[in-house]
Amino acid sequence: MKKSKIFSNEELGIRNEELKGDGTSVPSNGTKVPAPVISIENLNRHFQTGDEQFHALKDIHLTVAPGECVVLKGVSGSGKTTLLSILAGLDRPSSGKVLIEGEAIAKLPDLHASQFRARRIGMIFQHYNLMEHLTVEENVMVPLIPTGLDSRAIAQQVEVALTQANIAHKRTTPAARLSGGEKQRTSIARALAADPAVILCDEPTANLDRANSLRFIEILGQLHTAGKTIVIATHDPLFDDLPFPARVVEMEDGKIRN
Ligand SMILES: Nc1ncnc2c1ncn2[C@@H]1O[C@H](COP(=O)(O)OP(=O)(O)OP(=O)(O)O)[C@@H](O)[C@H]1O
Ligand SMILES: [Mg+2]
């Protein structure tokens, strides 16, 4: 896999620099450096089950630059899904700071968090999480409802997403009647509908055959070219040799391995 440069906060020029209002910072050499899209500092997540406490994420630090693709690897139970859930604002940290486009999503009231998620974050899951009785286009439309867009804008964005994900020809088919690959492409269209800056994928190819996994990776490459910031948790060896630059981040026992 071609590895892109790993940016430290210092390299991104953000630790000791004043952030400008437009989300950029100006390091001492005068070049404008974009602010990170994802910034995680000292993140911990404890789960309480009865009297037992389980430390699932331990002092995580991670910075992801705009347009970067990060592949999260690590054995089962190492904390990948827990980390993605916190990035998506579906779960909250026990301690630490998580900023998405400068916004502390865990600190937002629920309504604002769901609006922020609807507009800025697209999620793709292993089990697709589609509503089986709804058609492809209805599934893609659902997450646009909290955005507050009018129905014409929603219809336009759904159309663009269906085409991008190559599933427009199945728009009126109920999800229950789709193949696995078609379900995954519907979930890609749903993730893209709001034109989010960040795409989070959890084991996106775990239920796909090789041909459909390669098609998924091709669409991911197009999203990368379009400048999306992408984080993928996966065990799939196909992600070891992506046709576009990606940074591998290894998780082990709730920590990021250096
Ligand atoms: N709600 C919860 N309550 C208690 N423990 C949890 C909870 N969610 C996750 N855990 C524990 O946190 C650890 C990390 O789980 P997580 O699902 O993040 O792993 P993962 O790296 O995604 O694994 P996999 O590769 O199998 O998907 C596991 O030991 C899991 O049992
Ligand atoms: Mg997982």
Image: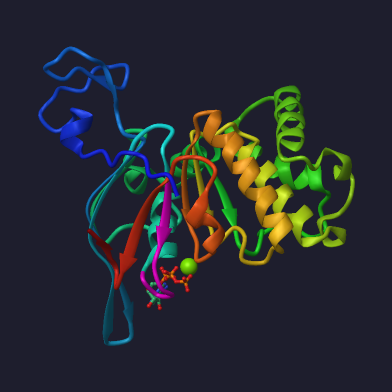
Relative to 245, residue 160 above or below: above
Residue 146: image quadrant is: top right
- Residue at point 65%, 49% (across, down): 216
Name the spot of residue 83 as percent of width and height, x first. Answer: 38, 59
Relative to 33, residue 74 above or below: below
Residue furthest to the top in view is 30
Is residue 209 one of those drawn in magenta?
Answer: no
**Residue sitting nearer the eye, 139 or 74:** 74
Relative to 68, residue 216 above or below: below
Residue 119 seen in this snapshot: no
Residue furthest to the bottom in view is 51
Ligand 1 location (quadrant): bottom left
- Residue at point 38%, 44% (across, down): 3
Name the spot of residue 22 as percent of width and height, x first. Answer: 32, 16
Name the spot of residue 72 as percent of width and height, x first. Answer: 41, 57
**Residue sitting nearer the eye, 179 or 173:** 179
The region drawn magenta spans 70-78
Locate the C terminus and report the quarter of the image it occupies: bottom left
Residue 136 seen in this snapshot: yes
Q: How is the image coloured?
A: rainbow
- Residue at point 34%, 61% (across, down): 250
Residue 175: image quadrant is: bottom right
Disc tally is 0
Q: Is residue 95 left or right of residue 5?
A: left
Name the spot of residue 169 as percent of width and height, x first. Answer: 88, 40
Is residue 74 one of those drawn in magenta?
Answer: yes
Q: Is residue 71 left or right of residue 65?
A: right
- Residue at point 19%, 30% (across, down): 14
